[in-house]
Each structure stands twice: as C-alpha cells, then as structure tokens.
Image (tube, rainbow, N blue to C red):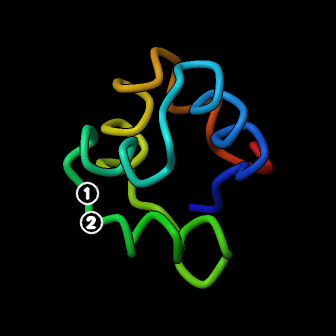
Amino acid sequence: MRVDSKKLKLLSLEKGLSLYRLALEAGIDPSHLYRILSGTRGAGASTLFKLSKVLGCSPLDLAKDI
C-alpha cells in the first residue's frame, strides 16, 4: 500500500519525532521506512498500524489514494 509521505512527515514533525526515531518507536527498520517514503516499497497493513499507533492517528490517515 502506498503511504502519503507528506502526511506522515507532517505528523512526525508535530510529534517532535525524526523519521529515524519514528521508525524505532514503531518497531520497524529505519531503512524500511525510508524506502516506503521514497516510493521504492509499499507498506503492509501491520507497518501502517505500527506507524499510526506511534503518531496517534488512523492507519487510513497514512494511506494514499483511498
């Protein structure tokens, strides 16, 4: 699934988290998050859930084109 990278970056900034720190708190490898944000990789449902939990939003808020 494609991720709305602008929204994810904005929410991360609002929480005061770097993307590296966001990845660590979500329990995913930072390089995996960077590949998702660059569009090289899609994100699975479990990854969206982990990120949304840390950011305090719905997984659908992070999904693009839904």
Where, quadrant-wise, is the C terminus in this rendering? top right
Image spot of residue 40 (x, y percent): 60, 84
Q: Which residue is mark 2?
A: 29
Within 10 Å of disc 2 (Cα), the crowding (few <14, some 14-19, many 20+) is: few
Q: Is residue 24 left or right of residue 41?
A: left
Numbered tag placed on residue 2 in the rendering = none
Image spot of residue 22 (x, y percent): 39, 42
Residue at (48% x, 33% y) in the render? 17
Residue at (64% x, 54% y) in the render? 3
Q: Is residue 7 left or right of residue 35?
A: right
Image spot of residue 21 (x, y percent): 36, 44
Image spot of residue 14 (x, y percent): 64, 20
32 versus 24 height, above or below? below
Q: Is residue 59 left or right of residue 9?
A: left
User: Looking at numbered disc 2 in the image, what kind of residue is underneath it?
Assistant: Asp
Residue pushed farthest bottom? Answer: 40
Q: Which residue is mark 1?
A: 28
